[in-house]
């Protein structure tokens, strides 16, 4: 939750919601809620976190960035 009247607190969440809507929700008509749940899970776990490149992260996926940071800390 963001502080009252401070839109910047919620910018990361709003960016994610915008991405999932543009890249999945608005492009697919789901037959059932279960189909929607499955597609959203796959989008987040398989695509967004493992494959999608994020400009703020130097065009790496979140998993790739975390692995790089872990290896740098271990060295």
Image (cartoon, rainbow, N blue to C red):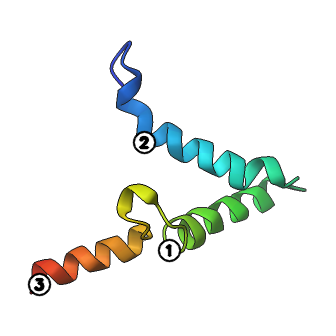
Image quarter of the C terminus? bottom left
Q: Looking at the picture, how far across and down is residue 46, in whole percent?
A: 58, 73
Within 10 Å of the Cα at label 2, are there few (<14), some (14-19), or many (20+) other Cα atoms? few
Q: Identify which residue is drawn at 82% across, 53% down.
A: 27
Q: Is residue 1 visible?
A: no
Q: Is residue 43 above or below residue 17?
A: below
Label 2 secondary element = helix
- Of 12 and 35, nearer the camera is 12
Residue pointed to by mark 1: 50
Q: Is residue 69 above or below residue 54?
A: below
- Of the image marks 3 and 2, the number of the one nearer the N terminus: 2
Left or right of residue 65, residue 32 in this image: right
Q: Identify which residue is drawn at 33% across, 20% down.
A: 3
Identify the image quadrant of residue 6: top left
Within 10 Å of the Cα at label 1, are there few (<14), some (14-19), or many (20+) other Cα atoms? some
- Of the image marks 2 and 1, the number of the one nearer the N terminus: 2
- Of 40 and 17, nearer the camera is 17
Q: Identify which residue is drawn at 38% across, 12% down.
A: 5
- Of 69 and 30, nearer the camera is 69
Residue pointed to by mark 3: 74
Between the C-alphas of marks 1 and 3, the distance is 22 Å
Q: Looking at the picture, how far across and down is residue 64, in whole percent?
A: 38, 76
Between the C-alphas of marks 3 and 2, the distance is 28 Å
* Total count of labels: 3
Q: Is residue 50 visible?
A: yes
Label annotation for residue 3 = none
Between the C-alphas of marks 2 and 1, the distance is 18 Å
Residue pointed to by mark 2: 12
The answer to whether mark 3 and mark 2 are in CB contact below 8 A is no
């Amino acid at each position: 939750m963001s502080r009252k009247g401070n839109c910047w607190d919620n910018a990361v969440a709003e960016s994610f919601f915008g991405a999932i809507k543009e890249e999945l929700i608005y492009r697919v008509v789901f037959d059932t809620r279960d189909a929607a749940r499955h597609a959203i899970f796959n989008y987040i776990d398989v695509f967004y976190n493992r494959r999608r490149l994020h400009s703020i992260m130097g065009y790496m996926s979140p998993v790739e960035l975390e692995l790089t940071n872990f290896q740098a800390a271990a060295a």
